[in-house]
């Protein structure tokens, strides 16, 4: 059953026999790392191919060699694999450069393309506006012979960058500005990662894209909404470059791109942040890059769930970041083990505990199969500093002078006394264990409402925990994105955690009880475990 308007189009095409099989493609430009906006396109293209037993290819749009790099190609494939998608093949736009050149020659021979001497500024100026038609190039009526000669000379490297272009000859008075004699080839003397130095002219994306789709057998070319006005030229290229006879010639379908509050998904800005070293790299957990949110600890399944929940629509809108975090939290709540981590430690001495004992706690009460682990309780432990108050507020159920609280999975304890420094800050709390109050076997008669986490100081590991805030300060039209960068978007605290964390692998996720969800980072070593906060426990999304 079709779930969205794209699937409705596809099912109608299958029903009417317009297509016998479905083929999509994901066409990234290898000039940067994928971000979460690309995840939506990945889910749509690969999801449709999977649903209709079709195929989906990766096709790199490598028509601009000055911005592309092999590093990005490898990173893109790693991100797609992380999301769990399998491609049916990998193609490059550059695989078709010879064919595109032949198509351009074909257009010249048909009188549908001409070599123009206008520079980029002149072309832009003469293109007109939404209310005014464009002005024809003074070179528009060159003969076919002259155009062929000039185009070959462009190919042979006789002209400098920008000196000449090849333009389609369509209609300078068209209401669609994209049909006003668009540039389809430009001179660019640049080394290409694939074709090396073979070419010094390169096709424009709008010319290359439909040719690639047609040659590869793409049935549904799914792209974001900003390409909707480009669709007439897409169809024009297919019709005039010898591909209109294909029974299942590709059709372009547009959907609304993914916009999320507080997330800047401009590759240019992200690249600037990386190059200026304001962030740790493309995989900085504060960035919306797929490698960044992977390092942040977001599960791939949660990203796909998020893309599925927001759906596929035709009009642009903005999704709350809290909704994304809610999807992540729903996944982690079922799949993450609970451990005890103390981020602001306060020493507690259990005065009547002489020998360490074993306690038992659940790993994850929400898991399909609930398991437990043993932890030690010794004479000295750490609790969160916020779990002890000298002057507690009303309805405070944690530890206080002459008060009781339960240690998670262990005993009820009573605060007997405390020590302070010369500034009046509490440095140690002395407590006694209530006899016969072990969790799960309590017959002490003492009733408490509060349960707090703790860590055995004799059997723990040191932690460094990174917490993340907004990458940019509040929107201000007078400031550039760089000026809005928030230097406090990452803060670090040091604490302690259970000994079992020592066995964790990079990428393992945990819920630190009553604190949040965290993932072990690659910067960890044997002396210090580094954790990134994934999301807080509290869900701020209003379902």
Image (cartoon, rainbow, N blue to C red):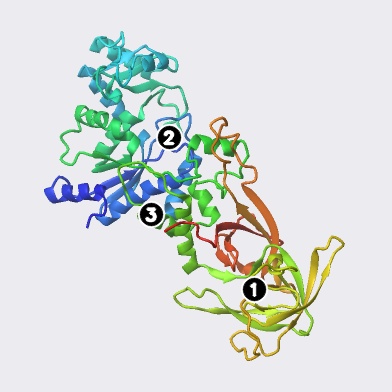
The nearer-to-camera label among 3 and 2 is 3
Q: Is residue 498 left or right of residue 362?
A: right
Residue that carries the numbered disc 2 in the rendered image: 194
From where the camera sits, is residue 88 visible? no
Name the quadrant of the C terminus.
bottom left
**Displayed quadrant of residue 177:** top left
Query: Which numbered disc flags the more N-terminal residue, 3 or 2?
Result: 3
Name the quadrant of the N terminus.
bottom left
Q: Which residue is farthest right?
A: 422
Q: Position of residue 20 (x, y in %)?
A: 17, 49
Question: Does residue 89 lie above or below 325 as drawn?
Answer: above
Front residue (pair 236, 411): 411
Q: Is residue 289 left or right of residue 57?
A: right
Q: Position of residue 377 (x, y in %)?
A: 70, 79
From where the camera sits, is residue 39 visible? yes
The nearer-to-camera label among 3 and 1 is 1
Circle 1 SS class: loop
Residue that carries the numbered disc 1 in the rendered image: 397
Residue that carries the numbered disc 3 in the rendered image: 85
Look at 19% across and 30% down and name the residue there: 239
Q: CA distance from mark 3 to mark 1?
A: 48 Å
Crowd around label 2: few <14 · some 14–19 · many ≥20 (10 Å): some
Q: Position of residue 5 (x, y in %)?
A: 25, 48
Query: Which numbered disc flags the more N-terminal residue, 3 or 1?
Result: 3
Q: Position of residue 57 (x, y in %)?
A: 33, 46
């Amino acid at each position: 059953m079709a779930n969205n308007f794209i699937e409705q189009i596809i099912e109608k095409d299958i029903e009417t026999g317009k297509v016998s099989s479905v083929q999509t493609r994901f066409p990234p430009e290898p000039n940067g790392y994928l971000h979460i906006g690309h995840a939506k396109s990945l889910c749509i293209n690969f999801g449709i191919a999977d649903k209709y037993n079709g195929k989906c290819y990766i096709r790199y749009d490598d028509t601009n060699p000055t911005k592309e790099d092999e590093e990005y190609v490898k990173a893109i494939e790693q991100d797609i694999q992380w999301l769990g998608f399998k491609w049916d093949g990998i193609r490059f736009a550059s695989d078709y450069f010879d064919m595109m050149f032949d198509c351009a020659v074909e257009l010249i021979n048909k009188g549908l393309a001409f070599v123009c001497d206008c520079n980029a500024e002149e072309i832009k100026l003469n293109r007109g506006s939404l209310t005014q038609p464009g002005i024809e190039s003074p070179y528009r009526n060159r003969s076919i012979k002259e155009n062929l000669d000039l185009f070959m000379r462009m190919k042979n490297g006789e002209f400098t960058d920008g000196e000449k272009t090849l333009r389609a000859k369509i209609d300078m008075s068209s209401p669609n500005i994209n049909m006003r004699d668009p540039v389809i080839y430009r001179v660019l003397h640049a080394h290409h990662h694939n074709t090396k130095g073979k070419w010094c002219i390169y096709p424009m994306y709008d010319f290359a894209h439909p040719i690639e789709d047609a040659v590869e057998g793409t049935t549904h070319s799914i792209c974001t909404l900003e390409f909707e006005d480009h669709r007439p030229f897409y169809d024009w290229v297919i019709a005039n470059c010898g591909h209109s006879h294909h029974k299942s010639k590709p059709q372009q379908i547009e959907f609304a791109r993914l916009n999320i509050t507080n997330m800047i998904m401009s590759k240019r800005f992200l690249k600037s942040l990386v190059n200026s070293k304001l962030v740790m790299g493309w995989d900085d957990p504060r960035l919306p890059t797929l490698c960044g949110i992977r390092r942040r600890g977001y599960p791939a399944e949660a990203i796909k769930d998020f893309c599925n929940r927001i759906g596929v629509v035709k009009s642009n809108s903005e999704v709350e970041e809290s909704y994304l975090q809610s999807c992540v939290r729903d996944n982690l709540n079922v799949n993450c083990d609970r451990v005890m981590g103390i981020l602001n430690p306060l020493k507690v001495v259990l005065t009547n505990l002489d020998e360490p004992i074993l306690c038992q706690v659940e790993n994850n009460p929400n898991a399909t199969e609930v398991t437990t682990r043993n932890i030690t309780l010794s004479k000295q432990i750490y609790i969160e500093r916020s779990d002890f108050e000298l002057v507690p507020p009303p309805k405070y159920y944690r530890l206080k002078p002459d008060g009781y609280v339960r240690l998670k999975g262990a005993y009820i304890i009573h605060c007997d006394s405390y020590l302070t420094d010369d500034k009046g800050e509490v440095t140690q709390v002395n407590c006694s264990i209530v006899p016969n109050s072990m969790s799960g076997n309590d017959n002490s008669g003492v009733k408490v409402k509060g349960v707090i986490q703790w860590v055995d100081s004799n059997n723990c590991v040191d932690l460094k925990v990174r917490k993340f805030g907004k990458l940019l300060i509040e929107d201000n039209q007078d400031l550039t994105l760089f000026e809005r960068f928030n230097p406090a978007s990452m803060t670090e605290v040091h604490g302690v955690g259970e000994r079992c964390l020592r066995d964790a692998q990079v990428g393992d996720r945990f819920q630190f009880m009553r604190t949040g969800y965290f993932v072990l980072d690659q910067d960890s070593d044997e002396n210090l475990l580094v954790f990134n906060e994934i999301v807080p426990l509290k869900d701020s999304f209003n379902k």
